[in-house]
Image (cartoon, rainbow, N blue to C red):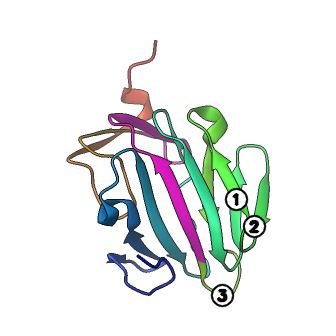
Amino acid sequence: MNIHTDDWDVERETVKIRFVGHALGTELVGGVVLELAPGHRGPYHLHHGNEELALVLAGAVTVRREHDERTLGPGELAFFPRGRDGLHALENRSQEPARVFLLSSKVAPDVSERPEEGLVGAFAGDVPTLGRDAPVEHFFPVESSVRG
């Protein structure tokens, strides 16, 4: 499989997605190639069950974190651990498309938070991937979630 081809599984207004991990039949490591159009703003989120690693293949990608942001170029990496320290969003603030190879662990079930939207998500049967739903995927308002 060549991750530099334009063979997309999902095409949306500001993002194109290729399911690399699913296509290769991976069990424990997930992967997608994303092409982010200029102006793309990915969801600001974290995962409680899965880690993510983003490798910029082309263009410039801004990684927004809780306390800072950084623009990455080709060959640069960003790591997002599980939990609050992994809170992030991928954005393309440039005038050119950008490509990212996003790897993640495939722990299911997983719980995700989207604090700017006030949402908590629960996933089972697969891991959440942009453009492809897990067999069980539900988002709930934070105020309705159970807090310990």
Q: Which residues are magenta?
A: 99-120
Horizontal and vertical percent for residue 121?
Answer: 38, 40
Real-space Cα distance between discs 2 and 3? 14 Å
Residue ID for mark 1: 77
Q: Mark 2: give few (<14), some (14-19) or many (20+) Cα within 10 Å.
A: some
Looking at the image, is mark 2 or mark 3 nearer the viewer? 2
Residue named by callout 2: 72
Q: Are marks 3 and 1 in contact (CB under 8 Å)?
A: no
Secondary structure of residue under mark 3: loop
The residue indicated by pointer 3 is 96
Query: Alpha-carbon distance for marks 3 and 1?
Result: 19 Å
Q: Is residue 140 above or below residue 116?
A: above
Task: Specify which label sits upstream in the sequence, 2 or 3.
Answer: 2
Q: Residue 18 or 92: which is nearer the viewer? A: 18
Mark 2 secondary-structure assignment:
strand
The reply to whether residue 42 is visible in this rendering is no
User: Picture quarter containing residue 96?
Assistant: bottom right
Residue at position x 60%, y 84% in the image: 97
